[in-house]
């Protein structure tokens, strides 16, 4: 890369996220977001979940306009860019291929460095996007909760992260989305359950807390118990869901929060680390945010990401790219997208 770019203190990084069903592009000036454009994909709603083939096709048609819009909103010409960052994985292979191929081509065409980013690390590093807020100090624990992951991560540096607890089966986002499907709600159901739950009684119905070893999670048994409960109630009263929707949502959400926080508390006690951040799409949940905030009374320092950086977005890929850029941690053009990668 041109030495004068490295020598200058200002970097303009263009980042691309395409791991699942959102096509996103951001431009960052160092650790500040100049633009963060996200094209969602409504096509999956009718199927109650993401259809991988349709997701890749939609990324194909979205990516060029999304990148153009991100550059225009940032008021940056592509010749000013210092590096290109992209999500290498984990995620859906066909989706990742679109973003990674585009990023590689752009880096080649502009002759600027390419930076590969781990999607789940990016959900954590979103806390370092500079919006004038207090940022977590190392070490801290991160609860990363999304449609594909549920992890407790010990973060010792921008680049050093260790997963100390993870789900043995389904992710928490799936528990929200599958419950929503049983209730006849649209996909993704997480935000809908969140808003219905606010009007319901969290103690109206009770569901069992699954048993999982150490700091690990399990959500598949929980999902089945919600399914059996709904089937049994509907058999007795065909209108059960309609008459109790808010209470069901509140009770399901309450149990999910209990499951998440029992292990998170265990992790805090085990590691002695009382600084806790949340990240990932499910961290947008208002009940989870409230529960985390209540832990301040127990002496925890808590960090909640700005709402727009919780669900998938390219700004979090950009901030991760920035910290790798500072270390000159660049990828070769032979780098390939990877559906599964460890942290
Ligand atoms: O991080 P994300 O955008 O994509 C993945 O990497 O998976 O997370 C998407 C997940 C979905 O399961 C969605 O239902 C859930 O995040 N979600 C929520 C809320 N907003 C999004 N779950 C509960 N409450 C919310 N407010
Ligand atoms: Zn995500």
Image (cartoon, grey):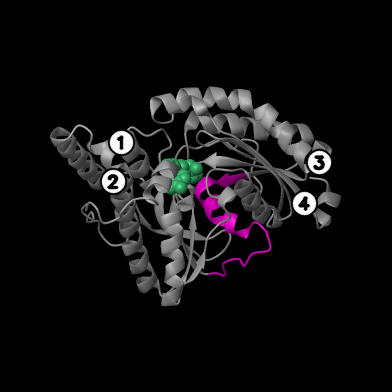
The verdict on residue 104 being magenta is: no
Please rate how many residues cluster around mark 2, counting C-alpha atoms within 10 Å: few if below 14, some from 14 to 19, many from 20.
many
Is residue 323 shown to the viewer in this render?
yes
Q: Residue at x 49, y 59 (%)?
A: 161
Q: Residues within 10 Å of mark 1 (few under 14, many from 20)?
A: some
Classify 10 Å Cα crowding around label 3: few (below 14), some (14-19), many (20 and above). Answer: some
- Kindly identify which residue carries mark 4: 11
Dot 2 corresponds to which residue?
Answer: 248
Q: Secondary structure at mark 3?
A: loop
Could you tell which of marks 1 and 3 lies nearer the N-terminus?
A: 3
Residue marked by disc 1: 183
Mark 4 burial class by Cα count in 10 Å: few <14, some 14-19, many 20+: many
Q: Choose the circle earlier in sequence order: 1 or 4.
A: 4
The stretch of residues the image draws in magenta is 116-138
Asked which quadrant contains residue 196, the reply is: top left
> Dot 1 lies on which element?
loop
Camera-nearest residue between 254 and 16: 254
User: Of marks 2 and 3, which one's residue comes earlier in the chain?
Assistant: 3
230 left or right, relative to 267: left
Q: Secondary structure at mark 4?
A: loop
């Amino acid at each position: 890369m041109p030495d004068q770019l490295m020598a200058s203190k200002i970097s303009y990084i263009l980042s691309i996220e395409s791991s699942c069903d959102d096509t996103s592009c951001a431009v960052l000036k160092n650790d500040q977001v100049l633009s963060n454009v996200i094209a969602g994909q409504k096509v999956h709603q009718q199927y109650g979940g993401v259809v991988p083939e349709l997701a890749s096709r939609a990324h194909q048609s979205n990516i060029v306009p999304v990148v153009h819009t991100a550059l225009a909103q940032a008021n940056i010409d592509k010749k000013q860019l210092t590096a290109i960052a992209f999500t290498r994985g984990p995620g859906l292979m066909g989706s990742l291929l679109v973003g990674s191929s585009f990023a590689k081509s752009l880096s080649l065409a502009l002759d600027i460095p390419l930076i590969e980013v781990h999607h789940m690390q990016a959900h954590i590093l979103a806390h370092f996007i500079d919006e004038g807020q207090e940022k977590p100090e190392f070490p801290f624990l991160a609860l990363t909760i999304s449609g594909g992951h549920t992890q407790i991560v010990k973060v010792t540096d921008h680049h050093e992260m260790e997963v100390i607890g993870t789900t043995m089966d389904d992710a928490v986002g799936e528990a929200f989305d599958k419950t929503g499907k049983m209730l006849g709600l649209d996909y993704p159901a997480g935000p809908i359950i969140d808003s219905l739950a606010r009007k319901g009684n969290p103690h109206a119905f009770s569901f069992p807390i699954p048993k999982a070893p150490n700091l690990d999670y399990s959500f598949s048994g929980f999902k089945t118990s919600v399914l059996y409960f709904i089937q049994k109630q509907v058999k007795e009263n065909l209108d059960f869901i309609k008459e109790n929707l808010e209470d069901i949502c509140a009770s399901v959400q309450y149990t999910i929060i209990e499951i998440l926080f029992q292990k998170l508390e265990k992790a805090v006690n085990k590691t002695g680390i009382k600084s806790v951040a949340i990240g990932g799409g499910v961290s947008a949940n208002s009940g989870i945010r409230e529960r985390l905030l209540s832990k301040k009374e127990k002496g925890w320092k808590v960090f909640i990401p700005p709402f727009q950086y919780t669900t998938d977005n390219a700004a979090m890929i950009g901030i991760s790219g920035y910290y790798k850029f500072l270390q000159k941690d660049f990828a070769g053009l032979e780098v390939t997208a990877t559906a599964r990668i460890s942290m």
